[in-house]
Image: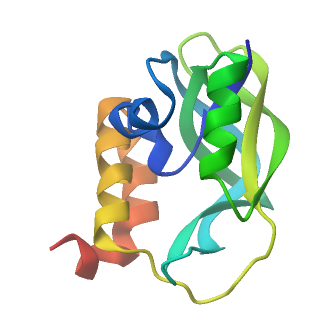
Amino acid sequence: MPTYFAYGSNMSRVRLEHRVGVVQSLGRARLSEHRHRFSKLGNDGSGKGNIEPHADASVWGVAYELDDDQFARLTEFESGYRHTVLVVELAASGMSVSASSFVALNIVEALEPRADYIEHYRIGMAEHEIPIDYRRQLLGTLAHLLG
């Protein structure tokens, strides 16, 4: 059963379960030496979440247990990304685990996400108690989208 690291809109359990069915959350998790950017061009022309290696930065997200069929369904939603395996730290236990995730095939600068997309982030980060400082850092520059 693969562990999946959701760092974007799939942090929201409702969004993820709409895509793949009922999932088991392992709680919030942190990916070291990476940063989050909206550098993946979506089919709608807007920016989608991406992670990129970056010293002295961390990305918070949610670790979920998915079965093989669920992961295959999720992969269908993640066009323009490639599968990768990362090591993340589970906040509840401090344990490091290998987790599957997705990174953009092509990085595009100066993209902006849509407000409805960002709402999934807000929901997921609140639901899983992602640290408030990280939320402010990630969403702070998007205040004009958040109304």
Q: Is residue 130 visible?
A: no
Q: How many numbered marks, from 0 up? A: 0
Q: State which quarter of the image contains the C terminus.
A: bottom left
Horizontal side of 12 relative to 95 (left or right) equals left
In front here: 117 or 127?
117
Q: In which quadrant will I find the N terminus? A: top right
Q: Quadrant of residue 22?
A: top left
Find residue 78 and report its horizontal and vertical position in percent.
Answer: 65, 53
Q: In the image, what residue occupies the spot 68% across and 29% down?
A: 71
> At 77% from the left edge and 20% from the top edge, which residue is drawn?
97
> In which image quadrant can residue 82 be found?
bottom right
Q: Nearer the viewer, residue 34 or 118?
A: 118
Q: Position of residue 123 (x, y in %)?
A: 29, 44
Reply above or below: 118 against 111: above
Residue most toward the bottom?
110
Q: In this view, which residue lies farthest toward the left?
A: 147
Q: Position of residue 28 (x, y in %)?
A: 51, 28
Task: Indicate whether 132 appears above or below 111.
Answer: above
Q: Left of 136 or right of it: where is 83? A: right
Where is residue 18? Give x, y as percent. Answer: 39, 35
What colour scheme was applied to this rendering of the protein? Answer: rainbow
Q: Note whether 97 is above or below 74 in the view shown.
A: above
Residue shown at the point (37%, 41%) measured from the top left: 125
Question: Which residue is depicted at the point 52% across and 84% down?
Answer: 45
* 28 sits to left or right of 17: right
Could you tell me if residue 59 is visible in this image? yes
